Each structure stands twice: as C-alpha cells, then as structure tokens.
Image: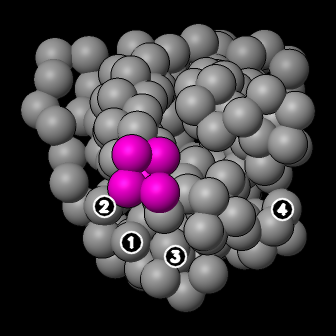
Amino acid sequence: MAIFGALSVIMSAIRVSFPLGNPNLGSTPVSISAIILNARSTFIVGIIKGLGVSIWTGQALLEMAAGIGDGIMGVFTNLLNKKIGPMFAVIIGQFSRFIFTSGMIALVLGVTSVISPEIAYPLIGRFISTSTSLSLIDVIFLIWLAMIPAITTSIIANVIVSIVIVITLKKSGLLKRLV
C-alpha cells in the first residue's frame, strides 16, 4: 500500500505538456494496486496520493478531491478485475475517472465556491465569473465540463501506461504470483 501510494505521489510529478491540459501519471499506481491489492487498500492508496500531492503542490482542495475520486476509481477497478480481468478493468477504471475523479473535484470546488468564494475563486475564476448567479448544481456542472479536456488527456496517458504495466506483469508471470 505504502509503495503504491508513494509511486502515485512521485508519478504525479511526471507531467506531459499538452495543449488541452497537463496530464500526470499519478493514477496509474492506483489502477495497478487495484488489480493486486484488495479494495480497501486501493482506496487508501488514492488517499495517500491525495495527501501527498496536496502537501507537494499546496492545492489541498483539488488534490484531496482528486485522491478521493481516484480511490473510488481504484475500488471500482478492483471490483471489475474480479469480473472481467486486469486489462479491461484498468481501462474501464481509468475511464470511470470522468465520473469519480472529475465529479469529486467539481463537487468540492462547487460547494467551496458557494460557502467561501474567496477560497474557490482563484481555482475556478477562469471558468465561472462570480458576478453570475448560478445554482450549486450549475456551478458543479460547469466546473466538471471545464475539466473534460484535461481529464481526457490524463485518462489516455494513464490507460496507456497501465496497459503496458499489466502486459509486462502478465508476461513475467508476476501478476499470477501477486494476486
């Protein structure tokens, strides 16, 4: 658990420059832990990722929400692994980040923008003007929409790396010994 958590923090520092966002590889260790560890341990890996990256970047609102969302994605991937196997589980699990990770970030930033706009505005000001009167649901939805390009590039990068790792683990026979 600690190793996957540490890897997720370290791999969050690996950013790919891309015009639609700068994806990082921090959720790959969460996906891989989901096919090796149990669901509870995988969720904890997501929490470790959120805590570690929060401390490293100083963006606790964003990163803790992302860590919780990635932890939920890990639990979902773990459940899928038992039904459809590791390859498709990590692919579908990564795509579930559209709901779990983006949704959690949008929820936290949306609620924060209603409770404390001065805290949330630096994070969401480029997406939503504070002069408009929007409902909480509208704000959450707009934040979620604004994240689609960045989360899409992140999902694609993490799917590719996760597939390579799963194939490598299968070919080496480690996956069967670890599970």
Residue 83 magenta = no
Residue 171 magenta = yes
Q: Residues within 10 Å of mark 4 (few under 14, many from 20)?
A: many
Q: Which of 139 and 85 lies nearest the eye of the viewer?
A: 85
Q: Amino acid at mark 4?
A: Ala
Q: Which residues are magenta?
A: 169-173
Is label 2 in a helix, a strand or a loop? helix
Separation of marks 1 and 3 at Cα, in angstroms: 5 Å
**Residue 11 has which mark?**
2
- Which residue is painted at 85% across and 42% down in the image? 82
- Which residue is painted at 37% across and 55% down in the image? 172
**Residue 7 has which mark?**
1
Separation of marks 4 and 1 at Cα, in angstroms: 18 Å
- The reply to whether discs 1 and 3 touch (Cβ–Cβ < 8 Å) is yes
Q: Which of 5 and 78 lies nearest the eye of the viewer?
A: 78
On the image, numbered disc 4 is attached to which residue? 39
On the image, numbered disc 3 is attached to which residue? 5
Image quarter of residue 142: top right
